[in-house]
Amino acid sequence: LQMSPKSAVSENRLKKKYVGLCALFALYSHIFKETSNTAKKVFREIYELHKRFPLVYFRGNATWNSLNFLQKSVPSEMQRVTKLPNLNTFSKEFLSKLESEFPLKVKALYLNISRWLVHMESNISDLRNRVSLLSQGLTLSNHVSNLFKTMLYLHTTQNKGLRSYYVPFLFQCTEMLKAIEGSYHRRSSMIGESISYMIKVVAYSIQLVLKPVYEKLNGLKKHTNATLDALAAISLAIQMLNGCATPCRRIILALALHQVVQSDLLNEQDMTLLDSYIAKLADISSLQEELSEATNCDFLFWNRELLPTYFSDIYNHPDYANKLQYLFAALRDIIPVFEKSVHDDPVNFLNHYTKEIESAFDENILSKLCRQIETNLRFHVHSQQEGSVKHLDPWKNGNSDLSKFLKINPLKFHDLHIDIKAHVAHYLDETFYNLNTVALYDWQTYTEMRNLAYQKFGLTLQEVHLPGQTLEQGLDVLEVMRKINFFVSAYNYNMNNQIFIQKSSDSKTLNTINIQVIANSIRTHGTGIMNTTVNFTYQFLKQQFVIFSQFLFDDIIKSRLLKDIRYFKEEREKLNNRYPYSMAESMSKDIMKLGKSEDNMTYLEKFRVLITDIGNAMGYIRLIRSGGLLY
């Protein structure tokens, strides 16, 4: 109770002992029914402490309220306290004040911790400064942890809903705790090599405070019982400081110093220095335990319903994507608690919690991120179309840099390994492949989207390696044979590659027939289909050659051809054995005078189509032969 209220370390240590102090006074009241004036004075001081510690957090969801405890344990003493406020009224007023100050407190702590981190990462040679820096880190972490727990569990105990506005500030507290823990870890080599020297420096500082008192008492000629007790206590304290600062030695040191304090041999300034040095000695000598307790975030497990809200906030602010590393580090603090489970297999706890975290993260960040990146790529690829560029206007739709999520390191929790960049790349690979197989004609669009994904987001996507045509066997030989007249007019023949390509189609795909298709058909129907196809095509060619002969032996066509032949033979030398273009153009105009057919084609054009059909039919026979050889 004599500790300074301005000392953060002392306040945190007093908070740990406050529960025991209240319980001790309740036990005293039950044993001694009538309390003295001193006890009443002590109780009033205990009661006043509830203004500093309205709530004490134990573990999990277990919290302790001093007013409720004292009201139930020592109601008579509570009645003696003047101006007793309503218990619920005080808690509501305290929470209302905390809500208004909470964002400002978090920002102030953030600035202090940022300043501390800069000093922590620098090279500090002075041991006293190192001691102060390490102790300050524990103080800041205790402040942050207490602020988080008080804010959250006051809402819980009062059954008051927590506004989503405060959720980012709450998780910012966990980020600061993990940042402090990470800084200690990075500087562990420096701490390890100098911690024994730092303990000696703090012990020497305590001895400097006690040495004048020791010399004063030792110089007295006459000693009373009180002075002898004080001298013995100081001698014992100095002796304890000469050795290693083990927990046993620190307990003996604390008992000896209590005896010195009661003798009123130290002034207020020395008392303040002594309290500060004792706190630093406790912090440095048990640094690992103190740091683990101060930065432990296992309470997030009992408040995991806040995770979806925080994940959504992170997604809406991609610049904060790096905070996810600290969050997952905080979520891992519950694993040692699970491993101590005896009523059920710890693996079951870990698996269920891992699935819960994975589901919340996938629903609120991963799935949304994948869909938005895909949409962004589509808008960019189709931005040349009218209206599409409006969706990319940063002044209307914002300018969120989604690549920040792809640049963070993989997130880990137990056996859960979340690589956001790999997950998004896999999603785009799968989506582009599935859609491309349905619409092969869009292969160029998806290729552009893959290139754009690499340029904008650094995503290396896999090539789909889809062929430029369908993977089916194509038109069957029997189907072509039955519709040979339609086939020769609807397809073009490439003589060099021996492939038929459809001229036009109502859809965005064109059918092709090559040697492999013919070989597949022969494999399906047998080699006998080859003779049948050749005979059927022969009959078709007979019909076409009849039409061919009728056209050439027409009187008008025949007379004009004979006239041109006679002229060519007579003027062969002048024409250099070349049929002149002017004569061909003149013949074409003469034939056009004969009129047009029902399909608006001249007779010469229809004759050209007839020759093409004959050539396609003969090319088809050649293709059948090549397919048979391949089979």
Image: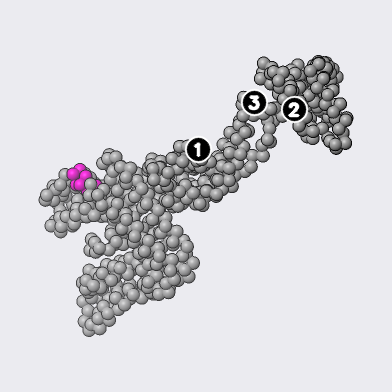
Distance, label 2 to label 3, CA atoms, is 36 Å
Which stretch did the figure color magenta?
88-95
User: What residue would you read off at disc 1?
Assistant: 385
First-in-chain label (2 vs 3): 3
Q: Amino acid at mark 1?
A: Gln
Between 235 and 126, the residue placed more toward the observer is 126
First-in-chain label (3 vs 1): 1
Between 90 and 100, the residue placed more toward the observer is 100
Q: Is residue 469 left or right of residue 274?
A: right
Q: For residue 332, say whether it is visible.
A: no
Q: For residue 550, say whether it is visible.
A: yes
The quadrant of the rendering that contains the N terminus is: bottom left
User: What residue would you read off at disc 3?
Assistant: 505
Q: Is residue 325 left or right of residue 458?
A: left
Q: Which mark is residue 586?
A: 2
Q: Which is the main secondary structure of the residues drawn in magenta?
A: helix
At numbered mark 3, what does the secondary structure look like: helix, strand or loop? loop
| x then y, percent, for residue 113 | 36, 60
Distance, label 2 to label 1, CA atoms, is 48 Å
Distance, label 3 to label 1, CA atoms, is 25 Å
The quadrant of the rendering that contains the C terminus is: top right
